[in-house]
Image (cartoon, grey):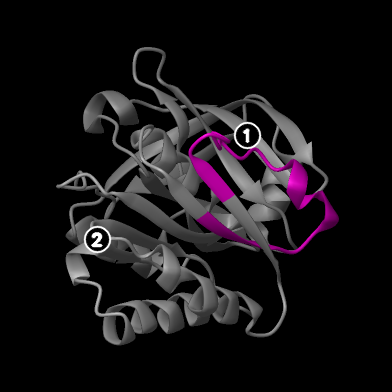
Amino acid sequence: MGHGWQGAVLRLMRGKDFTFTVTGAEQVTEDYRRVHCTDGGLLAAAGVHPTMWVRLWFDDQGKPHQRAYTLVDPDPAAGTFSLEFALHDGVASRWARDCAPGDTVDATLQGTGFEPLDPLPARLLVVGDAASLPAVNSLLDAHPETPATVWFETQHASDDALPFRLDPARHERRPVPRAGGELVARVKAELPALLVPGAYVWIACDTVTTRALAAYVRKELAVPKERVHALGYWRAA
């Protein structure tokens, strides 16, 4: 299957294509699935950095469908990593549910990047959900000595069993049920008290929420742009 006009654009932007092979999968919760893969040479070619992500290509009734996913536990020596899927009714989720060892999926590496936080943050203030959990975990792993508060939007009863990599001595998770505007309201009410000098704010949830909180942090709280990362991970249907 070709990658259509999106693939052509990514090639013009120097995107590099790889093919991953499934080696196994595990159902972490009823709503969250982890798929293990070999990397098709990706890690040897590109190296590894925190929150590293790729675009995966799926077949949607003969049409190319792409979505971005963070690599989980990439191992350059072994050429392996995992992918984690917050399951819903969609093309990528159906693939994750049905894939079996030996299946392959095309991927494009383009646009990923991570600049080490300099100076190191005095505190991480993180807003995310199940879709961005692999990136949240990667960020925390990259700053093991940094205290962090994570506002985490929940949708399912099983979300408490998700694979959070939290150190109780340094990390605090504040679950927020998914409801109209609840996450934005909670973060606006609670974040200012934790905004110590040198803090770093990292926001990765749905596009509407991400934009609202990014504007609040940058404009109303006047956090310098170099101390804020904001990226919408999905769009509400």
Label 1 element class: strand
Q: Which residue matches tag 1?
A: 35
- Residue located at (50% from left, 82% from top): 208
- Residue located at (22% from left, 44% from top): 120
Is residue 76 depicted above or below 61 in this figure? above
Relative horizontal placement of residue 71, taking residue 142 as reference (left or right) = right
Decide if residue 184 is in sight here: yes
Q: Residues within 10 Å of mark 1 (few under 14, many from 20)?
A: many
Relative horizontal placement of residue 133, taking residue 203 as reference (left or right) = right
Give the residue type that dot 2 points to. Answer: Pro
Query: Which stretch did the figure color magenta?
Result: 150-172
Label 2 element class: loop
Indicate which disc, 2 or 1, sits on the residue closer to the N terminus: 1
Quick check: marks 2 and 1 in contact, CB under 8 Å?
no
- Residue 150: x and y in percent read 52, 55
Q: Which residue matches tag 2?
A: 197
The C terminus lies in quadrant: bottom right
